[in-house]
Amino acid sequence: MTRTDKTPFILLGALVVLLAVGPFLPKWLFLLTMSLGKGLVVLGLVVLLRTGLVSFGQGLYYCVGAYAVGSLSQFASVRNALLLLLAGTLVAAILATALGFLLANYRGIFFAMLTLALSMIVYGLLVKTSALGSTDGFNVAPASLLGKTISGQGNQYPIFALACIVAFVAAVLTNSYLWTALGQLSSAIRDNEIRVEYMGASVRSAIHTKYVLAGALAGLGGAVTALTIGHIDPEMAYWTTSGEFVFVAILGGTGSVIAPFLGAIIFEFIRTYAYQYSPNTWQLVLGTAMLLVIIFLPAGLWSAFARLRRRT
Amino acid sequence: MRALSFTFCLILVSTLVVTPGAAQQPVKVGVVTFLSGAAAGPFGVPAKQAAEVMVEALNAGGKVPGYPAKGLNGAPIELVFVDEAGGTTKQVTEYRNLAQRVDLVIGYISSGDCLAVAPVADELKKLTIFFDCGTPRVFEDASYKYLFRTGATSTMDNVAAAMYVADSKPGLKKIAGINQNYAWGQDSWNDFVAAMKVLKPNVEIATAQWPQLLSGQYGAEISALLSSGADVVHSSFWGGDMEAFVLQASPRGLFKKSTVVLTCGETGMYKLGNQVPDGTIIAARGPFDMYAPDTELNRWFRKAYMDKFGGVPPSYPSYKMAQALLGLKSAWEKAKGKSPADVEKVIASFEHLTFEGPGGKVTMGLGKGHQAVQGMVIGTVKHEGSNVSYVNVKQYPPDKVTPPEGVKAEDWIKSGFKK
Amino acid sequence: MNEFLAVLVDGLIYSSWLFVIALGLTLIYGVMKILNMAHGSFYALGAYAAASMVGYWLNRGHAPMASYGILIIAAVLVGLIAGPLVERGLLRFMYGRDEMVLLLVTYALFLILEDVIKLIWGVNPYFVSEPYSLLGTIDVANLTYPYYNFILIGVAVLAGGAVALVLQYTRQGKLLLAVIHDREVSLAMGINVSRFYLVTFTVGTALAAIGGALTAPTVSVVPGMGVEVIVLAFAVVVIGGLGSLQGAALGALIVGLVRSAAVHYLPQVELFCIYTVMALVLIFRPKGLFAAAEVRKI
C-alpha cells in the first residue's frame, strides 16, 4: 500500500496562506521574499545532501543566476520578470551540466572542496572584471510583469507573490522528482553506491542529474534574490555564502522539500533579530542558536515538525 | 454620542499640537558602520564613537562651536546602531528593516553597500546620508532625491596623490603599486596611474601587486617591490593590511629604496607612527586629523573626542561622521524643520548647501547638490625626536582634484583634468 | 637568477607559514575525522594571547630576547586551555554523528569564538612587532629579509619533524596511528581512544595557536584575522590528502611556491593561485596527493 504524499497539499496550503496574509504584513514581506530565494538554493542542496554529497559551491550557480539576470537587465534592457528568472535558471543549469561531468566523479569532502574551488575561481574572475563593477557589482533595474513594475517601487507584495509562486512550483516539481525511481536512488547511493551499480542503475548519471537540478534551483534562487535586492556582486560566489546555504540545509533538515524554506525563514529571522538586539555580539547569538539546534534537533528543524505530525 | 466623543478627541489632539513648549519628539537616526570584522577597528568604531560624542554635545545644546541650537532644531537626537558587516545582500535587508524603525539613516563605509542601498533610499523615501564610502559611481551612475553624501569621493585621494608625487619627485621614472585586489584597490590604482600618465607621460609602471583583501602576508609582494626599482610605491591599503604592510616592509628597507604613498595612511599613524619612516607620504582622505584646519570647531571636536575615549585622537572616519551630522543639522535648521515629516524641506535645504565641519568647509556641489566636495591635503612624515610631524603639506582646492558636474571621474582624469 | 632565488625564498617562507597552520588541521582530521572550521579562531586566539603576553612582558621592561619564548608559551597555553575546553565541553558529545554535522558544530564554534575574542580584546589592533625586527636582517638574492622569517621556516620543519617522529617511533605515536586507521578495532583492543582524541585536539589547537603567535609580530592583530586563514588551511590539507603529514607539507610547498612565482611574474593571477592549484590537484589526483587507501563497503 503506497502512502499518499501529502507534501504537495501542504505546499499548496502554505502558498494560499502566504498570498492571503501577505498584504497584511508589509514589514515582513522583504524578509520572506529573501528567505524564499535562499530556500530555493537550499532546496537544491537538500537534493544533493540526500545523495550524501555536500556542495560548498552552490554560491557559484546562485551568483551566475543573479548575474544572468543583472546582465540581461543592464545590457539588454530586458525587464520581464519571468523571462529574467528563466534566463537565470537556464544559464545556471547549462553551467551545472558542463561542470557536472567533472564533479560527478567526486565524493565526500573532495566533492565539497572541488565545488568550493570552482566557485572561488568564478569569484576571482568576477573580481577581475571591472566592466561588471568588480567587487562593487552593479544594480538591477526594477523588473515588470504583465506591464506592471513589480520590484523597486515601494510595494513589496508583487515580487513576494511571484517568489511564492515560483518557490511553490519549484518545490512541487522537486518533490515529484524525489518520488520517482531516480529520485529515490538518492538514499541508496548515499548508503552503498556499488550495490546501486549492481542493480543496473547508473550512479554517475543519477548524480549528474541531481547536480544539474541543484544548480538550476540555485540559479533560480539567485535570480529571485537579484530582482528582490536590486543589486548583485561577486560575494554571492564566495565560499562563505555557500557555507551559509549548507548551514541552512542542515538547520532545516533533509526530510522534506518544505524543510529548506522553513530553515531559511527561521535563519533569516534569527539573524535579523541578532543584528537588531545585539549589534555588537550577533555572531555569538547566531552561533549559539546554531549549536542549540544541532544539539537538540540533530535531524534539523523539520524533524520536530515530523515528530509532531506523527503524534497527531 | 459618537459625534461628541469625536469632537472631544479632536479638541484634545489639537491642544496637544498647538501647545507651545511641548516636549519635542526625538529624531531617531540610524547609524550603520562596521562593528565587527577587520573594518571595525580603523573605521566603524571611530565613526560610532564620533557619533556618540557629537550627539551628546548637540543634545546638550550650546557646546558645539557654530552650532548653538539643541539637537536638531530643538528635537533631541536618538542614535540606533546597526553593524555593517555581513555582506551587501544582508545590508540591504537590514537597511529596509532599519528604515521602519528610524526617521533617517547615516552610514555606510563599504562602496558595495552604498551602491546597493542607494536606490532603496529613494524607493522607501527615507532620507539617507552616506558619510564615508568612496566610489564616485553613486552619483555618476544615477541621480537620487533622498540620498546625500557628505564625504568627498575617493577620486581626489589618488589624483591629489599623483599631483603631490609629481611635484615632489620631479625626476620620477618608475612607479609601482600594491593594492588590495577588490574594487577599492583597483579603482584607486587606476585613478593614480591615469593621473600620473597625464602629469608625467613617460612614467613607467614597474610592477602592480594585487594581494587579496585581508591577506596580511606580503613577503613575496615586498620582495617584488624591492626588486622593481620603483621610485614611488602607491598603496590604498587600509587598516590591518596597511599596518601589516608597514611592519613587514620597513625592516626590509622598502621605505628607503622607494617613496611610499599611503592614501589611507592616517588611521594607522596614532599607533604605528614610530614605525613609519621619514619621507613616507600620508593622506587622510581629506582635511582631517593632522591636516584639519585650526578652527574652534576642530579644537573642540578633538578635545571632546579625546576626553571621552581615553586620549585617542579622532581619525578620519570620526571626522567624516561628525561632518555628516553637522551637515544634517545645518540642512535641518535651514529648513526650520519641526518634525521628520518635513523631509522634503530638509532635502531642498540640503541641496547645494555649504556648511562647516571639523575639517573645514564642505559644499554639496556635485550630484545635483547631493554630493559633497572638499579639498584634499597631503603631507610627508618627518620624525622630530619621538614626535611624528608632517612637512611639505600641500592643500589642493576641490576644483583641482574633483571632476565637474556630469563628468565621470575616469573620463575627467584622462582628459587631462579639463574643467 | 636573483629573481628566481627570491621566488624560492619567498615561497619557502610562505609555505612554512601555511604548513604550521595546516599541520594542526590535518592532524585533527586524520585522527578524529573532524574538519575543524574553528581552526582559524584558535589561530587568532594564539595571535591575541601572544600579543598580550609579549606586550605585557616588554612593557615591564624585561629582556626582549625572551619574547620568542613567550610567544610559544602563550600559544601553548591557548592550546592547553582552549583545546580541552572545546573537546570535552562540546565535541565529545558529537562523536559518531555525520561528518557534516561536526563541520557545522565547528562553524558555530568559530562564530562564537569570533565574538568572544572581540569581547575580550576589543576591535582595536594590537602590535607586538619587536620580535620581528630584533634579530636583524640578512641579505639574500639582493633583497633584505629579517632573520625572523627564517625562524618561521625552522619552526615549520621542527613541528613537522616532531609530529612525524612521535607518530613513527614512539609507542603512543603508533597507538595513535592505530586509532587513525580504525577507531572501532582500536577501542576493541583496549586503546583509550577518548584520551587520544583529547590529546590530538589539544595538540592541533596548540599548533594553530603557534601559527598565530608566530604571525603576530609581523602583522597588526585585528578581528577577523582567522577567517582568511581557514580556507587557506583547508585548501592545503585537501591538496595534500586529508590526514597526511607529508601531504600537508607538500601541499604547503606547492601552494607557497606557485603563489610566490605568481607574485613575482604575473601578479594579477595571484587571486586564483590557491584555488586553481586545488582544482588541478583534485582533477588529477581526486583524493589529494598522498591519499590514504580507503576501505569500501560492498
Image (tube, helix red, strand yellow):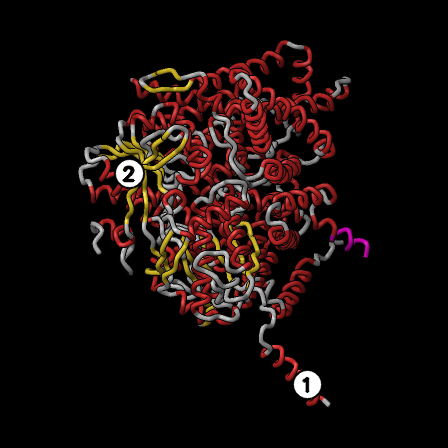
Residue sitting at x 27%, y 58% = B404
Give the extent of the magenta segment: A305-312
Image location (x, y in percent) of residue B51: 51, 52
Q: Mark 1 lies on which chain?
A: B
Spot the residue most to the right.
A311
A87 shown above or below A59: below
Residue farthest along the top direction in this orientation: C169
- A34 or A179: nearer the viewer: A34
Q: Position of residue C271 (x, y in %)?
A: 41, 36
Residue A102 is left or right of residue B17, and the answer is: left
Quadrant where the C terminus of chain A is found in the figure: bottom right
Amino acid residing under circle 2: Asn
Residue B120 in view (yes/no): no
Q: What residue type is labelled 1?
A: Phe
Image position of B136 (left or right of A268): left
**Residue sitting at the far left:** B202
Mark 2, secondary structure of its residue: strand
Residue C117 % position (x, y): 60, 36
- Which of pointers 1 and 2 lies earlier in the amino acid sequence? 1
User: Which disc number belongs to residue B8?
Assistant: 1
Q: What element carries label 1?
A: helix
Residue B16 percent across, percent down from the top left: 62, 77
Q: In this view, does B73 lie above or below A243?
A: below
Q: How far apart are marks 1 and 2 (CA)?
A: 72 Å
Q: Is B123 included in the stretch rendered in magenta?
A: no
Question: Is C217 located above or below residue B377 in the figure?
Answer: above
